[in-house]
Amino acid sequence: MANFVSRRQFTVEWSQCDPAGIVFNARFFEFFDWGTWLLFEAALGVRPPDLAGAFGIVGLPLVDAGARFLAPARFGDVVELTSQVSEFRRSSFDVEHRLMIRGELTVEGRETRVWAVRDPANPAQIKAQPIPADVIARFRET
Amino acid sequence: MANFVSRRQFTVEWSQCDPAGIVFNARFFEFFDWGTWLLFEAALGVRPPDLAGAFGIVGLPLVDAGARFLAPARFGDVVELTSQVSEFRRSSFDVEHRLMIRGELTVEGRETRVWAVRDPANPAQIKAQPIPADVIARFRET
Amino acid sequence: MANFVSRRQFTVEWSQCDPAGIVFNARFFEFFDWGTWLLFEAALGVRPPDLAGAFGIVGLPLVDAGARFLAPARFGDVVELTSQVSEFRRSSFDVEHRLMIRGELTVEGRETRVWAVRDPANPAQIKAQPIPADVIARFRET
Amino acid sequence: MANFVSRRQFTVEWSQCDPAGIVFNARFFEFFDWGTWLLFEAALGVRPPDLAGAFGIVGLPLVDAGARFLAPARFGDVVELTSQVSEFRRSSFDVEHRLMIRGELTVEGRETRVWAVRDPANPAQIKAQPIPADVIARFRET
């Protein structure tokens, strides 16, 4: 039973490219962030700015990220970004992002994020919290 | 009697350049923001993250900005950024930024910012407040 | 007879916002750049990466830019960006950008750009060139 | 025999932080890029914009990148960035980046890059090339 997949299409902008004429690598991590917010919006039906309030969390802080760059993405290329939770654990989860251009896999990304709440013992700190079962359930494709 | 001038030197990074091999225009407005924080730190002796707390403001929101691009700034160029308040008004002020490369004026920028506090009648809103005279005084070069 | 207007709708991303929770000012100049490319694509029927080749130019270098920030743009806000050439001169032109959020004008921007070719006398330099009449004509709304 | 380590100190800017008040994750990959250019400049004695010309390469394209985020980096924090080649292979190499704040490891990054030349058979393509032995030798600390 696969998890829900969000999809977004966009075109590579001049502002995202470097002197080699291709998307600067850090921009892909920005795209992954777009993908994760969209995925949670699509799965949970909550607008991104309302996510924290709706679930009593401070956010979904990133603890690990990575990418494989298989081919360059150029100015004007049309990108299909798909994002999917590949694994839910007790209080953290992995998101996989795939960027396709003209049907070819161009960049693969992954993020590990935490379901984080304010620490009641020390409100200046955050701490991981178990992900509610009904949140996880809403990511299951039906 | 001129106002205090802050100075910062930095080198143009690959990540700041576009496919034309020159600094992408939006990056200059990021540099201007760096300049304004540095200027206030230098004039007031307060670290940027402590500025709001030290003066009971919510920040220095930008209401107008502009730039003239006289020559390109290229990867590896050494930039001298100078920033200066050109005019204090009752509750707003103008900052002028100049970027020099190899002694030539490359970009001129200006920002208009507001001395802003949380509105006591509606804490979700901010409102302009007169700039304290002793703040203005500390920008005068002696 | 007004000039052609391009329109783009997008949602403010987390990655575009600063610690005040609003779009960081430099990002608006990135949005203006998106708007200008889109405007030229819509008016001239040429994909952005093909623009230089199709017209024998090196690009549309920016010589002046500015913005008025009338209200904050927040994470999740839906932005309507309209872009329009407000004036064509012999070899330069002005583009006006307007960002509307919930029907309210939020940011106004302007760019002055040059129709630029490689200098035949010195290919390392660029120089302004008269904008072809048929280019200007295609921006007239019919 | 360890490889050469480059060091750079900088302060976290407002423009690099997100609504959580901490450096937005993609910015760290921009910092890693800064680190790699600096490392090659320091080891090889060649200014970054001259690197490609000096060695007949098109650049050092990134094929893989990753980061572990151990603690947040906040506005105003002073960052010590160290960068080091952890392994040279025939035509690719790994760079390790470490960001320390107040003596604590905050973010660990890694990049895999390729020593790339223009493909003589197809100049629109690039291909990996063996890294010259004297390049590798200059990274050895003496």
Image: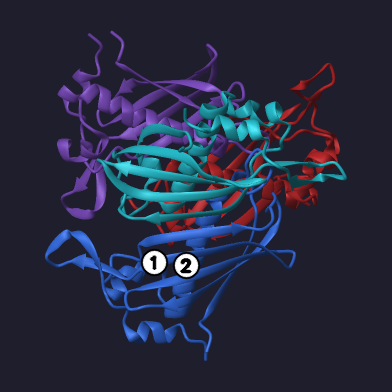
Chain colours: A purple, B blue, C cyan, D red
Relative to residue B121, is residue A93 depicted above or below? above
- Count neighbours of disc 2 (C-alpha within 10 A) and say few if under 14, some if 14 to 19, many if 20 or more: many
The kind of residue tagged 2 is Thr
Q: Which residue is mark 1?
A: B113
Q: Are marks 1 and 2 in contact (CB under 8 Å)?
A: yes
Identify the chain of the residue marked 2, using the numbered disc in the image. B
- The residue positioned 33% from the left and 38% from the top of the image is C79
- Residue B60 screen position, x and y as percent: 36, 66
- Residue D140 screen position, x and y as percent: 76, 45
Q: Residue furthest bottom?
A: B142
Disc on the earlier residue, 1 or 2: 2
Q: Which residue is mark 2?
A: B36
Relative to residue C76, is residue A46 depicted above or below? above
Q: Which residue is more in the foreground, A27 or C124?
A: C124
The answer to whether one can see residue B111 in this image is yes
- Residue B64 screen position, x and y as percent: 42, 60
Q: Which residue is more in the foreground, C46 or D128?
A: C46
SS label for mark 1: strand
SS label for mark 2: helix
Say if labels 1 and 2 share a chain. yes
Image-based side of C53 in relation to B139, left or right: right
Tell me the number on the disc at residue D18.
none
Identify the chain of the residue marked 1, using the numbered disc in the image. B
